[in-house]
Structures are given as C-alpha cells and as structure tokens.
Image (tube, grey):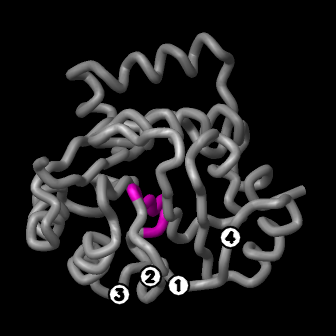
C-alpha cells in the first residue's frame, strides 16, 4: 500500500477534487502544460491531471522511490531550494507551506519559474490570509483566488454527503465552517 492510500481515506475523491481546483482556479491550464508539484509525497496527484506534464518533488527518498515504483515522475528535492531546469505553467504545494523556511522567499522563488499560477492550500486558522496575500504580492502574484476545500482527508463520505460539502464550498456559509475545520485552495497569479 502506498502513502497516498494510507494518508487519505478516499484518495480518488480527495485528489480528484483537488485536481479539479488546480485546473479551474486562476488561469486555466491547457493540455501539455507543465506542472511542478512541490512536497508531492508519492505523486498520487499526477494520476488526476491527465494531459498535464507532471513532475513531483519530495525530500523523502522513500516517497520518491514509492512514486517511481508506480511510474510517476518524482525527483528528490526540498521545496525550499528546488528549481526546475525550465519554467513551468503551474506550481503546486499542498499540505507543506508550513515547511517553508521563509514563506515570502519561497513565493518569490516560485514566481521566478512559474508562468501561470501557484496553487496551494492554506489553513486560515494557522495563517492570516492577508499576510499570505501580502507575501504573494511582494513576489509578483497580484491576484489570489480562494476556494474553500471541504473534502475530508481522514474519513470517507457517502457520495451524496461529499457532493453536498462540495456545493457548500461555493456558498457564503463556507466562511463560517472554515473557522472550525478545513482549508482553502489558493490560486495565485499575475494580471495578464
């Protein structure tokens, strides 16, 4: 069993919803666009982004080996220093922003090699959205689109309940639930 299967109660539903938001928030990704997934674990997200050229980066040799055993393009590296050899359309970083030695510097570096957008998750009970927005602006990302993400990680829901939670993400009531649980998926981009 891989890390993805042990980290998520329903890996398919969780990662498919995350992938949907990666594709739809901020500037749209097109077939053939390159995506760099920092702190990717075993790269399970790659299977939910068909047509996107996926490359994952993780600092754990065990995660990289697990990913490679499954045919996923994942390399060894740390999110604080890794830079791709060529620019990418999008960079993602999930469940890992808190690993940044300096969040503003991480955003600045990512802005240097990311053409369309940076997509990441943000726990509003851990980080103030205004502080993160200021760091993104200083890095050159003028736009920030936020979407509540109500897919539970550690337990599986019946399909009707999962659909209801996803519908709730788009309502004003979502901000109330974020005071207690769940996170945002954020897409930072530049004006074009």
In front: label 1 or label 4: 4
Residue 87 lies, in percent from the top left, at: 39, 69
Say what secondary structure mark 1 lies in.
loop
The correct choice, above or below, for 152 with respect to 7 in the image is above
* Residue ID for mark 1: 78
* Residue ID for mark 4: 74
Residue 185 lies, in percent from the top left, at: 37, 45
Counting other residues with Cα less than 10 Å from the Cα at mark 4, is it few (<14), some (14-19), or many (20 or more)? many
**Mark 1 vs 2, N-terminal side:** 1
Magenta highlight range? 89-96
Say what secondary structure mark 4 lies in.
strand
* Residue ID for mark 3: 101
The correct choice, above or below, for 85 with respect to 118 in the image is below
In front: label 1 or label 2: 2
**Mark 3 vs 2, N-terminal side:** 2
**Mark 3 vs 4, N-terminal side:** 4
User: Looking at the image, how many numbered discs can be counted on the residues?
Assistant: 4
Write the residue at 22% across / 42% down: 145
Counting other residues with Cα less than 10 Å from the Cα at mark 2, is it few (<14), some (14-19), or many (20 or more)? some
Counting other residues with Cα less than 10 Å from the Cα at mark 1, is it few (<14), some (14-19), or many (20 or more)? some
Question: Distance of mark 1 from mark 4, alpha carbons?
Answer: 12 Å
104 part of magenta stretch? no
Judge from the rendering whether residue 180 lies leftward or rightward of residue 34; answer left or right: left
What is the magenta segment's predominant secondary structure? strand
Q: Return the residue nearer the eye: 102 or 70.
A: 70
Numbered mark located on residue 83 in the image = 2
């Amino acid at each position: 069993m891989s890390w993805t299967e042990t980290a998520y109660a329903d890996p398919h539903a969780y990662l498919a919803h995350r992938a949907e938001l990666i594709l739809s928030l901020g500037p749209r990704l097109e077939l053939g666009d390159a995506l760099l997934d920092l702190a990717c674990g075993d790269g399970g997200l790659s299977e939910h982004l068909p047509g996107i050229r996926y490359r994952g980066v993780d600092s754990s040799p065990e995660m990289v080996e697990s990913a490679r055993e499954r045919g996923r393009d994942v390399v060894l590296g740390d999110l604080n220093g890794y830079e791709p050899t060529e620019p990418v359309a999008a960079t993602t970083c999930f469940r890992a922003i808190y690993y940044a030695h300096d969040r503003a510097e991480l955003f600045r570096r990512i802005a240097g090699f990311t053409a369309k957008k940076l997509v990441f998750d943000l726990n509003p009970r851990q980080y103030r959205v205004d502080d993160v927005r200021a760091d993104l602006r200083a890095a050159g990302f003028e736009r920030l689109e936020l979407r509540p993400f109500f897919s539970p990680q550690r337990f599986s829901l019946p399909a009707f309940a999962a659909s209801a939670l996803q519908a709730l993400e788009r309502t004003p009531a979502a901000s109330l639930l974020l005071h207690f649980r769940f996170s945002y998926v954020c897409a930072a981009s530049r004006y074009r």
